[in-house]
Image: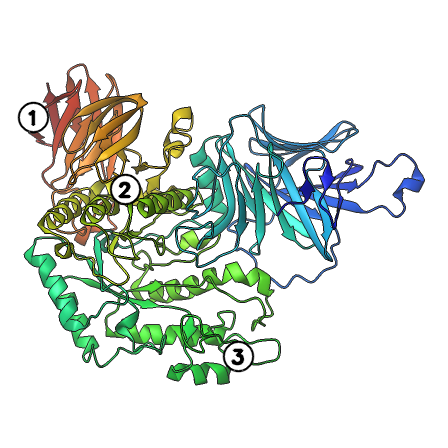
Amino acid sequence: MKFTDGYWMVREGMSALHPAQAYDVWAADDAMTVYAPTARIRHRGDVLNRPVVTVTYSSPMPDVIRVRIENHVGGVDRGPHFALHAPERVPVDIRVDEEAGVLTSGSLSVRVDRGERWQVDFSSGGRVLTSSPAKGIGVVEADGVTYVHEQLSLGVGEHVYGLGERFGAFVKNGQSVDIWNADGGTSSEQAYKNVPFYLSDRGYGVFVNAPELVSFEIGSELVGRTQFSVAGQALEYFVIGGPTPKDVLRRYTALTGRPARVPAWSFGLWMSTSFTTDYDEATVTSFVEGMAERDIPLSVVHFDCFWMREFNWCDFEWDPRTFPDPQGMLGRLHDRGLHTCVWINPYIAQRSPLFAVGAEKGYLVRRPDGSVWQWDMWQAGMGLVDFTNPEARAWFTGHLERLMDMGVDAFKTDFGERIPTDVVWHDGSDPARMHNYYAQLYNETVFEVVERRRGAGEAILFARSATAGGQQLPVHWGGDCFSSFDAMAESLRGGLSLSLSGFGYWSHDIGGFEGTPDPTVFKRWTAFGLLSSHSRLHGSGSYRVPWAFDDEAVDIMRRFTRLKMHLMPYLARVAEEAHTQGLPMMRPMVLEFPEDRGAATVDTQYLLGDALLVAPVLSADGMVDVYVPEGTWTHLLTGEQVSGPRWVRQEHAVDSLPLLVRPGTVVPIGAHGDGPEYDYADGVLLRVVEPADGQRTEVTVPRGGAHAGEPAVVFVVERTGDRVVATTAGAPGAWSVQAVVGGRESTLVAAEGGRASVTW
């Protein structure tokens, strides 16, 4: 939302007040409060009829500073609020003198100048990260509504990222972004997952603690400032220190919640029935058998909407016309070693037998006149489950438990974005604040019941909507995209933006959702999909089994599915970093190379973990531009090398893409390619790539399969001259080492007595 007409004037119909000076600065043990009148106080008469803005600085954890800006404080707070995983305040160092008030938390400080103009600087390591300058804070009246805004300075060459899963330009500079969940597909400025958090490559992040509509102007109103605003009398935000982007994400996710662990089987290939296609048990069985006959490892079978009868979504009842024996069918799928997932949404169609129950008992959201809120978009006469009502949550999850009793393992929690504001919630929540927050309640309700039934680390969703904190309830997928190279690129941009918004895992529909992909699009998307954290075949009106395209598509699906399974020792370690540190599995280049200006704007490639650079081919002719950071990078599959830092244009056959190993890293390759659940340390191959002379690397390989949960095996790899030696005291079985140094590949050497040595 913009408030100015150019730099000098306020827009017509608006009036603005701004703190003019830090008149009083009061210090307590854990907070610094600034009273800022909206004009200079030169004599006693100036204190009359003069609004005062109150700004309070505190800290919930080291290197994080909370800023609360308040105009009038007598309003009613109806909630909801983001759940923060930190104390309200922790002790800080505060120093106030005639020149300034300074609050320091860890290495991050805020300095409020007490001079002639309003000036607030946030600093770390002796360097100003960003500032709230004159007229940065504003209280604006517009059409009878009060808004509060803050503006923080943007430095020369500074880039802003994040704000949820956004499919437009990866770098947000120059964009106007409204944090308001919407079902807008991947080809618009709307987003399913809006997160009021941005990350700057200058060494800090900003989280606006407001679940309602937050309007961001990222250098799009005043070109040297980022502005964020909310309707109401108060605005609260956190400045989160770095210095690196990884440090910012660690602290942001410590504040808002870390991603949960997900089950190992979820990293395998998911196959969907697709949406409006015709399917029954025979169809599903033919797909499962087709995958097995073609030696394509399959982990999960997903049943989309029409597992239920049309017009009844949701009644949580299998359509007897197509699935007459659902429990027997699920058992037969489990006997094949497969897991199952079914589609749900938070809506109850009028024809569903559950509608009357929900309406009578108050489980559906109501209008102010007491009637049930209904509309016909999506499902005729549908109502919306009120998850602020504990009894409604229990009612909803009771039906999910019934499905889990049958053998359902996971739920695709679709929708949750089009949440009305002309309603009354059971707990009295503010409808404007509930619009975005509903996604959190919905997914939390489902995730918690699955976790309670399956155990911690064994629960997983396939969710579309989210807000801040949603990263705790994985996994999320990118929503409805078209089946084209353009849509593939926009999906990737969305995933990269989400990864810099605190989300550790992400997926997308291989081949695209809307329409039927050209075989080349499907094959290119297959490689991209299977080098993502989670991999699902799903479409709208057509199937996504590879033989629906051609034999080459089958070969490519087999190749990359088995590759991902062999990478499980590596991926399991990266997934654990998502859970323990809040770092995403799919990492934008800027996250791993924050000092490389060439990496700052790259949005067509990513690192899978910290060692594998993936550049999906986004063109029919196989040409791809890949940015290679400093050093000599080695293709994981071919051994070909390329040196950076520079852009390189390559041509790749349809069964290939740039998949480069970072110099100085060790990639553990698992012994099994037929599934994701096995003991990753047993039979592992340590592939050592271009280590520096004298380099010592510790390689952690988690246990899996029957040994999941046991301590990980740690290998130590050292290079001395022309020799690489790897040692461990804890390997459960055979293991081996292979090294690439100076472009030369050693022979594979099996370990003996906990030690393996290779030369070249």
Which residue is under mark 2? Answer: 573
| Residue at screen point 71% across, 37% down | 135
For numbered disc 2, what is the local secondary structure? helix
Which residue is under mark 3? Answer: 372
- Which numbered disc covers residue 168? none
Q: What's the CA distance linking mark 3 and mark 1?
A: 71 Å
Q: Depth-wise, is mark 3 or mark 2 nearer the camera? A: 3
Q: Residue 17, image x and y in percent? A: 76, 44
Q: Quadrant of the C terminus?
A: top left
Q: Amino acid at mark 1?
A: Thr
Which residue is under mark 1? Answer: 747
Earlier sequence position, callout 3 versus callout 1: 3
* Residue 60 seen in the current view: no
Earlier sequence position, callout 3 versus callout 2: 3
Q: Amino acid at mark 3?
A: Val
Mark 1: give few (<14), some (14-19) or many (20+) Cα within 10 Å. Answer: few
The quadrant holding residue 74 is: bottom right
Mark 2: give few (<14), some (14-19) or many (20+) Cα within 10 Å. Answer: some
The residue lying toward the viewer, choosing from 239 and 422, is 422
Q: Is residue 356 left or right of residue 551?
A: right
Q: What's the CA distance linking mark 2 and mark 1?
A: 26 Å
Q: Is residue 348 left or right of residue 10?
A: left
| Residue at screen point 46% across, 73% down | 385
The residue lying toward the viewer, choosing from 71 and 304, is 304
Q: Is residue 179 above or below residue 276?
A: above
For numbered disc 1, what is the local secondary structure? loop
Earlier sequence position, callout 2 versus callout 1: 2
